[in-house]
Image (cartoon, rainbow, N blue to C red):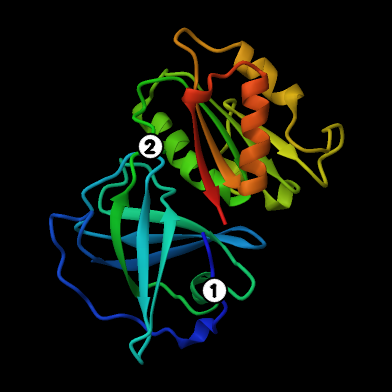
């Protein structure tokens, strides 16, 4: 999610716009209802969007802020909430240094503020929930993957799903309180006693790929360019078919 360098405080609350049933093509008003701190540098922002027609886990939306002088900034953000959260969407944003949109959210935005959203967008990275999913994410790359995890739990689904999530340390692990047996955290800089420290490696990836359920995994990789390349190579080396690896890159 690219950020540009302009002061975050230039944005005021946009006015309301009409809600259309063609939600993917029309801008809708989204009202901020809750801000929840996830890590020292990331927070989740929950919006009420009455006209939201739903999405598939892994999809994203476009968000628009309009300044009083007419300046407009638009960003693509992955959706963290599951489809079952009707009439609402949730985003989790890193506070990017110098970022005009993320800066506004982290320093100015308050419940009751309104932005505009359009979506859902892109079906390439979406998980329909009916086939085994192997998820690999790093940092805020876990956001669309968490939509998949939440969707599976709310459905009470027994479709196999595994998540390998990389973070610098426990304090930087987004959604730390939500992970269950399906999740293996990988810490690259600091870790609890007895937990190894280092990059995601074949040690974590190969056994999961080798234990694929009948029909094999559909792999979803999300993170920085460097992480996406690294994780994809590990998957291929472990025997995951290239045509069953879906990649979304942040940056």
Question: Which of marks 2 and 1 precedes in the sequence?
Answer: 1
163 or 171, nearer to the observer: 163
74 or 29, nearer to the observer: 74
How would you rate the neighbour count of disc 2 (Cα within 10 Å): few for under 14, some for 14-19, many for 20 or more? many
The answer to whether 116 is drawn above or below residue 179 in the figure is below
Q: Residue at x 38, y 39 (%)?
A: 57
Q: Residue at x 30, y 40 (%)?
A: 84
Element class at badge 1: loop
**Quadrant where the image shows the C terminus:** bottom right
The answer to whether 37 is drawn above or below residue 69 in the figure is above
Image-based side of 157 in relation to 250, left or right: left
Give the x, y percent position of residue 129.
Answer: 36, 27
Give the x, y percent position of residue 90.
Answer: 40, 55
Q: Quadrant of residue 99?
A: bottom right
3 or 45, nearer to the observer: 3
Give the x, y percent position of residue 76.
Answer: 42, 59
Between marks 1 and 2 in the image, the one whose residue lies nearer the viewer = 1
> Residue most toward the top?
214
Image-based side of 185 in relation to 117, left or right: right
- Determine which residue is flagged by label 2: 126
Give the x, y percent position of residue 34.
Answer: 43, 64
Image-based side of 78 in relation to 98, left or right: left
The answer to whether 34 is drawn above or below residue 61 in the figure is below
Q: In whole angstroms, how far apart are the C-alphas of marks 1 and 2?
A: 27 Å
Q: Quadrant of residue 61?
A: bottom left
The answer to whether 108 is drawn above or below residue 234 in the figure is below
How would you rate the neighbour count of disc 1 (Cα within 10 Å): few for under 14, some for 14-19, many for 20 or more? few
Q: Is residue 175 visible?
A: no
- Determine which residue is flagged by label 1: 4
Q: Is residue 55 visible?
A: yes
State if disc 2 and disc 1 touch (CB < 8 Å). Answer: no
Q: Residue at x 41, y 50 (%)?
A: 79
């Amino acid at each position: 999610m690219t950020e540009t360098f302009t002061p975050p405080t230039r944005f005021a609350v946009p006015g309301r716009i009409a809600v259309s049933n063609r939600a993917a093509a029309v801008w809708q008003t989204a009202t901020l209802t809750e801000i929840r701190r996830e890590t020292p540098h990331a927070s989740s922002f929950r919006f009420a969007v009455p006209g939201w027609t739903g999405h598939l886990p892994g999809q994203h939306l476009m968000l628009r802020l309009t300044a009083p002088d007419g300046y407009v900034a638009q960003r693509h953000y992955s959706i963290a909430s599951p489809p079952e959260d009707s009439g609402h969407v949730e985003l989790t944003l890193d506070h990017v240094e110098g970022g005009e949109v993320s800066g506004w959210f982290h320093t100015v935005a308050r419940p009751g503020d309104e932005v505009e959203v359009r979506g859902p967008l892109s079906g390439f990275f979406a998980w329909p929930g009916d086939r085994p999913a192997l998820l690999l994410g790093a940092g805020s790359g876990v956001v669309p993957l968490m939509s998949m995890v939440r969707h599976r739990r709310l459905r009470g689904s027994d479709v196999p799903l595994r998540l390998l999530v990389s973070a610098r340390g426990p304090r930087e692990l987004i959604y730390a309180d939500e992970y269950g047996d399906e999740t293996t955290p990988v810490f690259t800089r600091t870790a609890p006693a007895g937990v190894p420290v280092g990059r995601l490696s074949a040690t974590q990836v190969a056994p999961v790929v080798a234990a694929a359920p009948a029909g094999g995994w559909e792999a979803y990789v999300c993170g920085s360019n460097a992480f996406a390349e690294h994780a994809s190579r590990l998957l291929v080396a472990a025997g995951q078919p290239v045509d069953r690896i879906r990649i979304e890159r942040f940056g």
